[in-house]
Image (tube, rainbow, N blue to C red):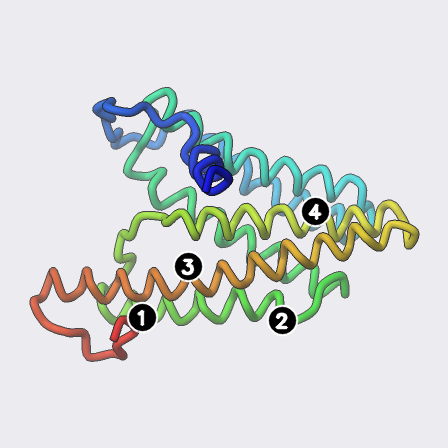
């Protein structure tokens, strides 16, 4: 129980209890700039991976994972929450994960199931959202979604680290797969939660059940 509470505190680090946050409407906040900078590191990672520079690629992925936590902390701690950041951060994370998974599969460093586990649920959710809302449903990021992202961003650098260290460090690869399997399981749980939340929001807005599927039945 204490471990779970500690994890929740880590995820929501920087939150100021009882503080009346002001949601900014500008792009120019420190967290948003960090988010964009983080996403711009993705092609740097792909370039290093293509060159076989696994050590450098591992460092870039580690930075990606760390800054994903840092921008959220700054937003909460220093009242830098923005309407743009609420959709920009999860969108950048999702695109980054897809590109990273594609690069891993293309380079033969990860199995195809890793890519399919990320892309297929996201595609279903995207189509479902377009049918119901003709765009983004504007759902908040859940704790499961945040944990999922953290696990995947922890597992992928470990896969590269095994390549950089050599075959005598196979245990690093085993640990990487533990994180990736847990991350993929979390991805499916988060996806199902978003599907249910989208259906509920549609009913609240229109007062009727959606015609396309009933994921929360």
Residue receiving disc 3: 190
Q: Quadrant of the C terminus?
A: bottom left
Residue with the mark numbered 2: 113
- Answer left or right for 72 relative to 37: left
The CA distance from mark 4 to mark 3 is 22 Å
Label 2–label 4 contact, CB within 8 A? no
Q: Nearer the viewer, residue 125 or 92?
A: 125
Q: Secondary structure at mark 4?
A: helix
x, y (%) of residue 69? 50, 35
Labels 1 and 2: the sequence-earlier one: 2
Q: Earlier in the sequence, mark 1 or mark 4?
A: 1
Q: Which residue is mark 4?
A: 157
Mark toward the viewer: 2 or 3: 3
Seen at 37% across and 20% down, the residue is 78
In the rendered image, which quarter is residue 212 located in? bottom left
Q: Would you call the spot at circle 2 few (<14 residues within 10 Å), some (14-19), or many (20 or more)?
A: few
């Amino acid at each position: 129980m204490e471990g779970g509470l500690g994890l929740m505190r880590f995820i929501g680090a920087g939150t100021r209890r009882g503080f009346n946050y002001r949601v900014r409407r500008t792009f120019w906040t420190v967290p948003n700039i960090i988010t964009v900078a983080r996403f711009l590191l993705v092609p740097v990672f792909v370039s290093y991976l293509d060159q076989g520079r696994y050590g450098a690629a591992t460092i870039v992925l580690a930075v990606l994972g760390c800054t994903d936590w840092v921008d959220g902390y700054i937003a909460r701690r220093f009242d830098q929450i923005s309407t743009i950041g609420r959709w920009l951060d999860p969108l950048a994370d999702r695109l980054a994960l897809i590109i990273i998974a594609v690069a891993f599969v293309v380079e033969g460093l990860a199995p195809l199931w890793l890519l399919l586990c990320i892309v297929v649920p996201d595609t279903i959710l995207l189509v479902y959202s377009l049918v119901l809302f003709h765009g983004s449903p504007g759902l908040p990021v859940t704790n499961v979604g945040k944990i999922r992202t953290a696990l995947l961003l922890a597992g992928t650098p470990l896969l590269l680290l095994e390549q950089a260290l050599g075959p005598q460090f196979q245990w690093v690869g085993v640990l990487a797969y533990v994180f990736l399997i847990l991350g993929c399981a979390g991805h499916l749980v988060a996806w199902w939660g978003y599907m249910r939340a989208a259906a509920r929001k549609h009913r609240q807005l229109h007062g009727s059940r959606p015609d396309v599927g009933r994921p929360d039945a």
